[in-house]
Amino acid sequence: MTTSSADLATLLVSCPDRKGLVASLAQTLYGHGANILDADQHTDPVAQMFFQRIRFDLSSLTTDRVALEAGVREVAGRFGMTWRLCWGHQRKRVAIFVSRHDHCLYDLLLRHRAGELDCELALVLSNHDDARAIAGQFGVPFHHLPIVPGDKAAQEDRAQALLDDAGVDTIVLARYMQVLSPAFVARWPSRIINIHHSFLPAFIGADPYRRAYQRGVKLVGATAHYITDELDEGPIIEQAVVRCSHRDTVEDLVRKGRDLEKVVLAAAVRWHLEDRVLAYAGKTVVFE
């Protein structure tokens, strides 16, 4: 029998590694009547940290969700866990930020329409008006917030107000060619996903394909990562590369790279929506 998504929940935990973690979490869920469907765990032997993702069925609960959450909180307190409990009936609300390059925007909208991305698309926001027709084609509200020199903080304040009004909890930068301020980023820890058109840490910043061409590289890549206040230094979620040669022009590298950007960004967004990603110490654990 297929379990309804409304009856599913996912628990993500991280904490210093010690004995009894797996058993304690399993016993807590079992004690409330939850049926564990799958569990994945990882231990970082260098950092001595433990990570686990547990997906479980709520339909057989013998208590209620409030009591279950209280039970998880008690275990987390005993083991010093950082934890997140995600309910299947609460679909994430996503905002897509874009500038003039629209290939990643189109790809995300098409994948969402096809049912590949389980979320609600709350809005598309851009510092240019070019993508208005694209958003309209898919029935997603579009907001044009131009950036006036010396007025970037005000533009971000207007953006934040729109995000608050729409109940957004995840931002996807689909080739949004603006550097977000530390103050803005601080409001969205591990909830802003960016696609960078390079295999980071190589060629951070602007115009990486031209710089890759100048260096004569034999691979170009794309990197999806969480945004932090350090440019292109956030925890990496997914990466991919494609071979190139001395015959490739800058335009060839851009064309090859754009294909990668779409696939890499979509994968990172999907894993985030499915609560498969835990960020720590400048990197991530991505559960299969």
Image (spheres, rainbow, N blue to C red):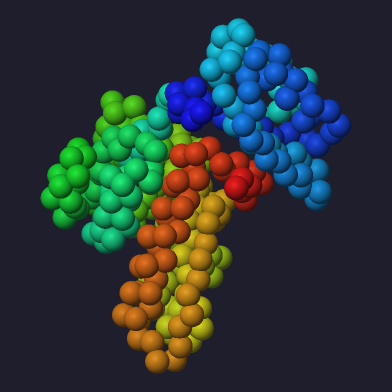
Q: Quadrant of residue 16?
A: top right
Q: Is residue 52 above or below residue 130?
A: above
- Judge whether 210 appears above or below 59 on screen: below
184 w.r.t. 81: above or below? below
Instruction: Look at 49% across and 22% down and name the residue there.
Output: 7
**Is 260 or 2 nearer to us in this picture?**
2
Looking at the image, residue 9 sits to the left or right of residue 132; the answer is right
Of residue 198 and residue 107, the one placed in the foreground of this image is 107
| Location of residue 153 in the rendering, given as x and y in whole percent from the top left corner | 32, 41
Between 151 and 210, the one lying in front of the other is 210
Residue 38 showing in the rendered view:
yes
* Residue at 15% from the left image edge and 47% from the top image edge: 137
Residue projecting furthest to the front: 1
| x and y, in percent, of residue 115 in the image | 34, 43
Residue found at the very far right of the displayed protein? 19
In this rendering, the answer to whether 244 lies above or below 238 is below
Q: Position of residue 103 (x, y in %)?
A: 28, 61
The answer to whether residue 157 is visible is no
To which quarter of the image does residue 177 belong? bottom left
Q: Name the residue at the bottom extreme.
A: 247
Q: Position of residue 104 (x, y in %)?
A: 32, 57
In front here: 70 or 116?
A: 116
Residue at horizontal 19 percent and vertical 44 percent from the top: 138
Residue occupying image coordinates x 62% and y 9%: 62
